[in-house]
Amino acid sequence: MDPKRRQSQKHLEDIRAILDISSKDIDKAGIEDWVKHLQLSEEWSAVNTEKMTSAQALAADREDDLESFMLPSKDSK
């Protein structure tokens, strides 16, 4: 994958995660107004596409990290 495309994809994933994690604190109507004003509908659509998949992947990664940190290994018993 082209490095610029990879970086762009990473930005989208980061934005999706931020929106999912902080959704209650974000003025979605305000964002929608600015999206229309700045004519960024295509870009905003890309952010919203598969938002749950990205957020779920992030949550799963965090759960795995937490479990591996907190749970004793089976060998240590």
Image (cartoon, rainbow, N blue to C red):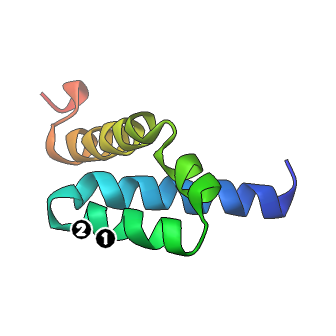
> In the image, residue 22 lies at what x, y percent?
22, 61
In the picture as drawn, the residue positioned furthest to the right comes out as 2
Q: Residues within 10 Å of mark 2 (few under 14, many from 20)?
A: few
Q: Residue at x 22, y 46 (%)?
A: 66
Q: Residue at x 35, y 61 (%)?
A: 18
Q: Nearer the viewer, residue 75 or 65?
A: 65
Q: Nearer the viewer, residue 60 or 26?
A: 26
In screen coordinates, is 49 left or right of 5? left
Q: Residue at x 45, y 61 (%)?
A: 15
Say above or below: 57 vs 38: above
**In this figure, which residue is indicated by the disc labeled 1?**
30
Q: Amino acid at mark 1?
A: Gly
> In the image, residue 3 lies at what x, y percent?
83, 61
Q: Are marks 2 and 1 in contact (CB under 8 Å)?
A: yes
Say above or below: 29 vs 53: below
Q: SS for tag 2?
A: loop
In screen coordinates, is 52 left or right of 5? left
Q: Amino acid at mark 2?
A: Asp
Q: Quadrant of residue 26?
A: bottom left
> In the image, residue 61 lies at what x, y percent?
37, 42
Q: Residues within 10 Å of mark 1 (few under 14, many from 20)?
A: few
Say above or below: 56 vs 12: above
Q: SS for tag 1?
A: helix
Q: Quadrant of residue 33?
A: bottom left
Q: Residue at x 41, y 37 (%)?
A: 57
Question: Disc 2 versus disc 1: distance between alpha carbons?
Answer: 5 Å
Quarter placement of the C terminus: top left
**In this figure, which residue is indicated by the disc labeled 2?**
27
